[in-house]
Image (cartoon, rainbow, N blue to C red):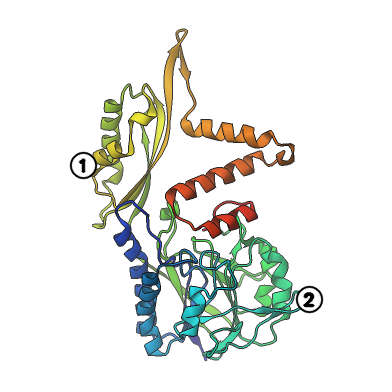
Amino acid sequence: MTVRFIHTSDIHLGKTYRGSGCDAQRYQDFFATFAGIVADAIRERVDFVLIGGDLFHTGQILPKTFAKTIEILQPLKDAGIPCIAVEGNHDWIHRRDSVSWMEALSQLGYIRLLRPSRTADGGYLFDPFDPEEGCGGHIEAGGVNIYGLGYIGSQAGNHISRICDAVATKRNILLFHVGVWTYSPVEIGNIKPEEAMPLSECFDYVALGHGHKPYIVNDAQGRPYAFNPGSPDCVNFGEERYDKGYYVVALEPDGKAQHEFRRTSPRPMLVVTANLDGAANATDALERFKVEMAGKLSGCADERSPLIEVRLAGKVGFHPFELSRDRLRASLCEISEPLHLEIKNHLSLVAGGGGEEKVKKSLAEIERDVLGELIGANSQYQGRVEELTRLSLALRDLVLKGDVEGEELLSLLSSGGEPCA
């Protein structure tokens, strides 16, 4: 029989902007989006729901986040619709002697958390899911065999053959928190398309997660076999360019997946550039800023307060610090009342000298140059100066935003890559 299910991923429950004054509203956004997906699952009477990882924004969540998650999942449980999930890099707990929130949800029967065991020689064992223990690597639902594998990092490509070797059934789905290069917008935790290809021979549908941009991967014959729905809400600035939603899938008896991408309606997120080139003083710059923002925000018809990132650009005749965040926000609020505002100041100070205009470097450029010199002074980092400079600045930005836990920062350092989605 045809099996129908919903495939979503990267929900990021618990995400907010700490100390920005919009914590409660932004926190609620992600729960509202997830509740809409659950309501659709019940309305469509699907056979099951798949979550491809990163249900939570961090592994260490607040008790109220756990309680609210149960509240949203309760209708699925009452309707008898299994919610099958794997752990992503965000909701994975690093201390394995502790019970994670995902494990707790599974033990309470709100999700079926899939996590395989390993053999002595590094192979995979997808043991049947044990509802009493709330664990296992494989579950049968609606006549389909579902295998689950959470985030395993940048070496995931080396595990594909071992995953396939452990599968002995037909009509299979793989739930896997991994990205595919050239499709995924993130730079770590990916596998190459050619590494992923053997999965198309073992699985009718590979349910991906990790990258927040939706995409579909075809096999050598052009059959779509791997699907990433992306995040159903805008988690980070830059994602306003992506479609947001989830898949409603009908898996036919012959293994063909009829998929429909259903769009969600996240709070508007805008990234705008204000060109202040030539402004002689801060007052002049603020007036120009207001005029530019009025033009660029005029097309936003959504009544919800937007999330805005403003990038200031240009050569100006005053110190960039004079345009403080408070002054810019006050000016912007005369046009639009953003729920959250981030300022990226890339202004350069212009100073006269010898009858010629001399442009001083921006603060961001000075920071990058100093870091590069410090890193390059150590011979063991030769050839990696740009990569490590970028990583250092990324870590700095994450710490200042208060958007990650210490364990996630350690994971990022050990990977040597950029922040994960």
- Residue nearer the viewer, 54 or 103: 103
Residue drawn at x 64%, y 51% is 416
Which numbered tag is attached to residue 379?
none
- Residue nearer the viewer, 241 or 122: 122
In the image, farthest residue toward the front: 97
| Secondary structure state at the residue bearing disc 2 | loop
Q: How many marks?
A: 2
| Any part of residue 185 in sight | no
Residue drawn at x 49%, y 26% is 361
Q: Position of residue 387 (x, y in %)?
A: 63, 44
Density class for disc 1 (Cα within 10 Å; few <14, some 14-19, many ≥20) is few
Q: Which residue is mark 2?
A: 121
The answer to whether 322 appears left or right of 209 in the picture is left
Q: Nearer the viewer, mark 2 or mark 1?
A: 2
| Secondary structure state at the residue bearing disc 1 | loop
The answer to which of marks 2 and 1 sits earlier in the sequence is: 2
- Image vertical order of residue 79 relative to residue 352, above or below: below
- Image vertical order of residue 108 relative to residue 184, above or below: below
- Image vertical order of residue 157 relative to residue 335, above or below: below
- Residue nearer the viewer, 90 or 353: 90
| Residue type at the position of mark 2 | Asp
| Residue type at the position of mark 1 | Glu
Q: Which residue is mark 1?
A: 334
